[in-house]
Image (tube, rainbow, N blue to C red):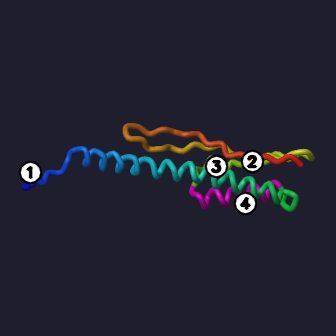
Amino acid sequence: MVSTRVGRGSLGCLVTALAATVVLYFGVPAAVTFWHCYQYEDRMRQEIEFAAMRSDDDIALRLRAYADTLDLPPDARRIVVRRTPQRMAVWATYSESILLPFATRDVEFTPMAERRF
């Protein structure tokens, strides 16, 4: 039997490939931004674990260096360290712009770590 297919690509395949490309183009940088926030918060938790051996200024200095390593915005380097005999908390607030298909959206991040003694 002779095939009647002419060899044309289907439009559905092209649309699917275009949609996947758009999702990857906009999704990967957004995911990296959220991943950096998670890493920063995790480093805050690590610093609190060793807080007995470090001063508040030393903790803030180490976190500023890590924010610089992650290439976070300058606001992320404004770290607040609060220590009382019963608890310790470390946090920062910053915003980053995320590129969307037809707009740019500013997302505010507040990584925080807290520990009770």
Q: Nearer the viewer, residue 106 or 49?
A: 49
Residue of label 2: 113
Q: Nearer the viewer, mark 1 or mark 4?
A: 1
- Residue 10 at x, y percent in the picture: 20, 47
Q: Amino acid at mark 1?
A: Thr
Indicate whether residue 68 is drawn in magenta: yes
Name the residue type under label 4.
Answer: Arg
Comparing 97 with 18, the one in front is: 18
Q: Secondary structure at mark 1?
A: loop
Indicate the position of residue 75 as horizontal and vertical percent values: 62, 47
Q: CA distance from mark 4 to mark 2?
A: 15 Å
Q: Of the residues under marks 4 and 2, which one precedes in the sequence?
A: 4
- Label 4 element class: helix
The circle on residue 4 is: 1
Name the N-terminal-most of marks 2 and 3: 3
Q: Is residue 74 magenta?
A: no
Q: Residue at x 52, y 53 (%)?
A: 32
Instruction: Give the side of residue 43 with respect to residue 34, left or right.
Output: right
Please tell me which of labels 3 and 1 falls first in the chain: 1
- Give the main secondary structure, helix, strand or loop, of the magenta stretch: helix
Please give the range of residues in magenta: 56-71
Q: Secondary structure at mark 2?
A: strand
Q: At label 3, which amino acid type do we have?
A: Ala
The spot of residue 31 in percent (x, y) is: 51, 50
* Residue picked out by circle 4: 62
Q: Locate residue 110 relative to residue 7 in the image: left or right.
A: right
Q: Residues within 10 Å of mark 4 (few under 14, many from 20)?
A: some
